[in-house]
Amino acid sequence: MAEIAQLQASEIRKYSSIHPRPADQKFTYGTAGFRLLGSLLDSVVFRVGLLASLRSRKLDGQTIGVMITASHNPPDDNGVKLIDPQGEMLEASWETYATKFANAASEDDLVKEYFNVVESLRINLSGPARVVFGRDTRASGPALVSALKDGLRSTDTKFTDYRILTTPQLHYIVKSINTQNSPVPYGKPSEEGYYEKLANAFKVVTKSKPKLASITVDAANGVGGPKLKELVKYIGSENLDVVIVKNDVTAAEKLNNQAGADFVKTQQKLPTGLHPKPYELYASLDGDADRIVFYYIDETEKFHLLDGDKIASLAASFIRDLLAVSGVELDVGVVQTAYANGSSSTYLTDILKVPVTVTPTGVKHLHHAAQLYDIGVYFEANGHGTVLFSSNAVKTLESFEAHSPGQQSAVSTLLALQDLINQTVGDALSDLLLVVAILVHKAWGPQEWDLAYTDLPNRLVRVVVKDRHAFKTENAERKLVEPVGVQPIIDDLVKKYKNGRSFVRASGTEDAVRVYAEAATRLEADELALKVSELLKGL
Ligand code: 16G
Ligand code: MG
């Protein structure tokens, strides 16, 4: 044991000297892992390799995932995050270790941090460690992969490079590997296995339904484009036609530029250069394909956004209806964040009569809250989300004895949905198929989908402040408790606007705070957002 420790300490020192930490740079493992300029990440990714190895050893050699991506951020950025064995986000308590490793000033400090974790968590260094990894299409990806491999080599960790993948594909693969020998394997642990699972489920869910009239997908010139193309091959053009645009992954600078889910959602407009046909369905993915938003234009060319809230409402109503037809009793709930449009929450609770939980921003919070329902639908307004089926839900559906063809078909559809919808994390490709499947079931186009409720006009503003860490919230980010005294002023402002609502929170991914405001009219929403933003500028 001592020998292994000594060997690892010297290997870590040796390799770490090839991946020096940039001076004066402070790193934080935030909601999306580490994320900053790709050129600053070499040492961070090397050190993430060390941590991934420890995480695997701590969990008796279960496979841990490492994804190298900066999602919707500009092409020069990159990032890295860890995936736990069931395809979930890294357990929160380990985020602190990640931050400590990344900031260790010298090789000696790094070795010290490494052995602090080994000792405090009693990790057996002679046990097996296994890591798999993937990356998006960014130019800085391959060099960061080399740094990661050095981290894994220095700790004698077995690894597999899955090369270019969407983030949710890697989550799928991690869960599939770790459930291979369990009574319910999640799927074949490969990219093909992912396509097969989704394609087969899509065919079951849409069986004997007509094909969707048309859908065009803006892939933000990222990894989602080629992967969607591949997925559609497995589904077959007799079942689904998709036109993919913004699908150039060879020109680095085009990634997420004036396109993609984040652009469309935050700017509330079409990707640049896209000229949709009225009432046809369009969608935009983000740079690592874990977010999707839909939209259409009407005959006056007005843009209509169908965001994460609209997807959640569509999915919840579909599932609720299937349960009603089948007669199976399971509770369905929806999890949202404070960014959910007020109209969507009212629609869910008052019309659909589905309970709504509100959590802080960030997938891990929503995911855990969704696990508390038999069937938990969670979506952030920005288009990240999924639907989780608990093991109780699956058992109940599997053992249900139907008394009519209608009941049987509803139960089979629900079970196939569980395969169609990525159970590990929000997945743009899987969500795309889910939405298409629901629309063909209902024989709806985008306009019918949009009719469920009308969004309150809203505005999101990014405000640069002296210290965003001074901004502390409670009540799922809806109340600002620090700096003291600001919330009452916001409350007074909000009261002046019909259907007004506004909140302020520090970004977890950028050095800024975000202001959200909604109100009965566009003008009022804009004005409220502006007033609240102005309030923060002096802080
Ligand atoms: C991260 C989160 C996303 C959240 C976003 C908010 C994960 C995997 N991703 O991208 O869920 O919406 O941060 O960004 O948790 P912000 O804190 O900068 O507003
Ligand atoms: Mg993303």
Image (tube, rainbow, N blue to C red):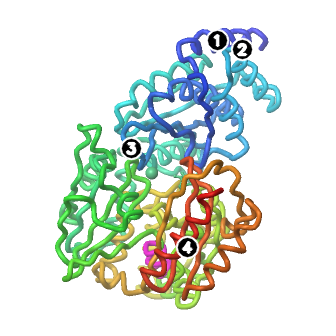
Quadrant for the N terminus, please. top right
Q: Which residue is mark 1?
A: 13
Q: Is residue 426 left or right of residue 83?
A: left
How far across and how far down the image is residue 216, in percent?
23, 63
- Quadrant of res 521: bottom left
Mark 4 vs mark 3, CA separation in Å: 44 Å
> For the residue with label 3, is its CB less than 8 Å from the closest atom of ligand 2?
no
Cα distance in 3D space between marks 3 and 1: 33 Å
User: At 47% from the left edge and 29% from the top edge, which residue is drawn?
Assistant: 160
Q: Secondary structure at mark 1?
A: helix
Q: Amino acid at mark 3?
A: Pro
Q: Secondary structure at mark 2?
A: helix
Q: Which residues are magenta?
A: 310-319
To which residue does mark 3 refer? 74
First-in-chain label (1 vs 2): 1
- Marked residue nearer the N-terminal end (2 or 4): 2
Counting residues from the N terminus, which is met first, the one under dot 1 or under dot 4?
1
